[in-house]
Amino acid sequence: MKACRLLCYWCFGLILVPCFTFGQTDIRPSAFTYNDQGNTISSNVPLNEINIHAWRNFHRIFRTVAGDENWFYSDQGYRVAFLQKGYHYEAYFDDRGSYRYSLHHYAGKEIPREPGDLLKRKYPDYQLNVVTEITDGEKIVYLVRMVSPTTIKTISLCDGDIQLIGEENIGSGIETASLTSRQSYR
């Protein structure tokens, strides 16, 4: 009986010890967080290592950002994820701080009228699901995910030019019904 209990404790220890030690090891890169008058700024590098031109360009282009800014530095430059007027955005800057482009993600029902009407005329049997708006300050490209009962299409729309990027068949109507009822918008 004592041997059985000892074996149980030994097995229990074998399972829990790695869990405790793994939980204590921080495998994420260190993050730096700063609070400034209601805004929280997070970064994977210290704030003073963010390129001043990227910082200034970001705050000049996106003046109404209120809340959290998440800066990320990599070899390609800087990425800033933030909320503006309740919508998720990402802005990209090169390593010298020049603005490259920004992404704006939103539901298909919120697409501006002109591109939305154009897509609905071209694909009347599809519902607009998710839109990613890409802009470089001069030109806007819309990447739109459209859903029908049997197909998902990814469309690119720029200056009235519609291009099919990808198409995927999603099988029988039973699987599709739950997909379109939960994730698509009209």
Image (cartoon, rainbow, N blue to C red):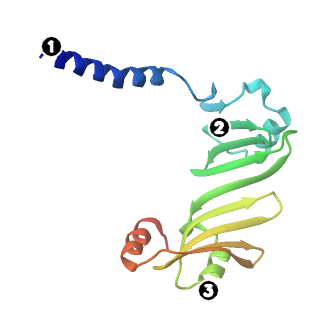
Q: Which residue is mark 3?
A: 121
Q: Residue at label 1?
A: 2
Apparent side of residue 140 relative to residue 19 in the rendered image (left or right): right
Within 10 Å of disc 3 (Cα), the crowding (few <14, some 14-19, many 20+) is few
Which element type, helix, strand or loop, lies under badge 1? helix
* Badge 2 amino acid: Asn
Which of the 4 quarters of the picture holds residue 107?
Answer: bottom right
Q: Is residue 1 visible?
A: yes
Pair 1/3: label in front? 1
Q: Is residue 62 above or below residue 159?
A: above
- Say above or below: 86 vs 158: above
Residue type (three-letter) at the residue carrying disc 1:
Lys
Residue linked to disc 2: 70
* Marked residue nearer the N-terminal end (1 or 2): 1
Looking at the picture, how far across and down is residue 167, in whole percent?
60, 75
Quarter in which the N terminus is drawn:
top left
Q: Is residue 104 above or below residue 4?
A: below
Depth check, front residue: 112 or 128: 128
In three-dimensional space, the C-alpha distance between marks 1 and 3, rounded to whole angstroms, equals 77 Å
Q: Nearer the viewer, residue 76 or 58?
A: 76
1 and 3 marks in contact (CB < 8 Å): no
Image quarter for residue 108?
A: bottom right
Per the image, label 2 sits on a secondary structure element best described as: strand
Label 2 near label 1: C-beta < 8 Å?
no
Question: What separation in Å lies between label 2 and label 3 (alpha carbons)?
Answer: 38 Å
